[in-house]
């Protein structure tokens, strides 16, 4: 996926979960943050960030913050909508007879339903933006929703689906993701339960630039 007309800026402060103040050409500008997570290690004063102009004409802010250059060494895409787009592009190369987004299962809406021959597949997609010592971690904040999705994947596996928890790594140079048990122990336990139940846990490695997020490899094709 590629963004049009990217704009470089300097981060000033986070105003709330949805908004931040940045500096463009010396002028303060309020922007929409396309990630409601904490992102404390990413959005620090003075960080170089990248914006894309909003396509919603009636919105108060004209720009969306989509990526950040962290510590002068890591380009990170932090757009929470990007992982599903990249996953959809990747799934289109995997030889499925059908790929359908937003599929209701149990009490949740999972990201993708796929079919190949007589086999049905379900997939939940998560984006990874947290890096520690070259390793990706998830989550960066407690996520009861994430735990619920994993439990649904376990139930789907028990019901005969091929079930996958897919992490799109939105960080240059990172190749794997591990559960962050310090941040959310229950999520780490659910991850382990899913692994034992036969849920596939897969990673998409990505090349990140200020204006693009492109899959360059996976931990295993279907």
Image: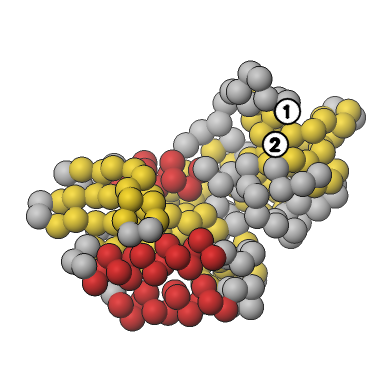
Q: Earlier in the sequence, mark 1 or mark 2?
A: 2
Q: Residue tagged by mark 2?
A: 32
**Residue 138, image x, y percentages:** 56, 66
Query: Which quarter of the image is occupied by the C terminus?
Result: bottom left
**Residue 163, image x, y percentages:** 29, 63
The quarter of the picture where residue 74 lies is bottom right
Looking at this rendering, what residue extends furthest in the front direction?
107
Note whether residue 161 is visible: yes
| 61 horizontally vs 118: left or right | right
Circle number at residue 61 = 1
The quarter of the picture where residue 221 lies is bottom left
Note whether residue 199 is visible: no
| 169 horizontally vs 88: left or right | right
Q: How many marks?
A: 2
Looking at this rendering, what residue extends furthest in the left direction?
118
Q: Name the residue nearer the viewer: 105 or 214.
A: 105
**Residue 11, image x, y percentages:** 81, 43
Circle number at residue 13 = none
Q: Residue at x 51, y 48 (%)?
A: 207
Q: What's the image's color scheme?
A: secondary structure
Q: Residue at x 63, y 18 (%)?
A: 57
Looking at this rendering, what residue extends furthest in the right direction?
26
Q: Residues within 10 Å of mark 1 (few under 14, many from 20)?
A: some
Mark 1, secondary structure of its residue: loop
* Cα distance in 3D space between marks 1 and 2: 6 Å
Q: Residue at x 75, y 58 (%)?
A: 40
**Residue 71, image x, y percentages:** 76, 56
Q: Residue at x 77, y 46 (%)?
A: 16
The quarter of the picture where residue 79 lies is top right
Mark 2, secondary structure of its residue: strand
Rendered position, 206 above or below 198:
above
| Cβ atoms under marks 1 and 2 closer than 8 Å | yes
């Amino acid at each position: 996926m590629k963004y049009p007309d990217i704009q470089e800026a300097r981060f000033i402060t986070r105003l709330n979960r949805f908004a931040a103040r940045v500096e463009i050409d010396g002028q303060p500008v309020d922007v929409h943050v396309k990630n409601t997570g904490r992102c404390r290690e990413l959005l620090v004063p003075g960080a170089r960030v990248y914006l894309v102009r909003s396509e919603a004409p009636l919105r108060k802010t004209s720009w969306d913050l989509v990526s950040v250059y962290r510590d002068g060494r890591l380009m990170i895409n932090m757009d929470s909508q990007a992982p599903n787009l990249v996953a959809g592009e990747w799934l289109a190369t995997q030889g499925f007879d059908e790929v359908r987004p937003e599929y209701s299962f149990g009490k949740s809406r999972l990201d993708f339903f796929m079919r190949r021959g007589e086999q049905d597949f379900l997939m939940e997609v998560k984006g990874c933006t947290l890096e520690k010592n070259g390793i990706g971690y998830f989550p960066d904040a407690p996520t009861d929703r994430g735990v619920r999705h994993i439990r649904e994947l376990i139930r789907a596996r028990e019901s005969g689906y091929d079930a996958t928890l897919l992490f799109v790594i939105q960080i240059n140079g990172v190749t794997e993701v591990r559960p962050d048990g310090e941040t959310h122990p229950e999520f780490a336990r659910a991850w382990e339960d899913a692994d034992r139940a036969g849920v596939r846990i897969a990673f998409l490695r990505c090349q990140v630039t200020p204006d693009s997020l492109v899959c360059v490899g996976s931990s295993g094709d279907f």
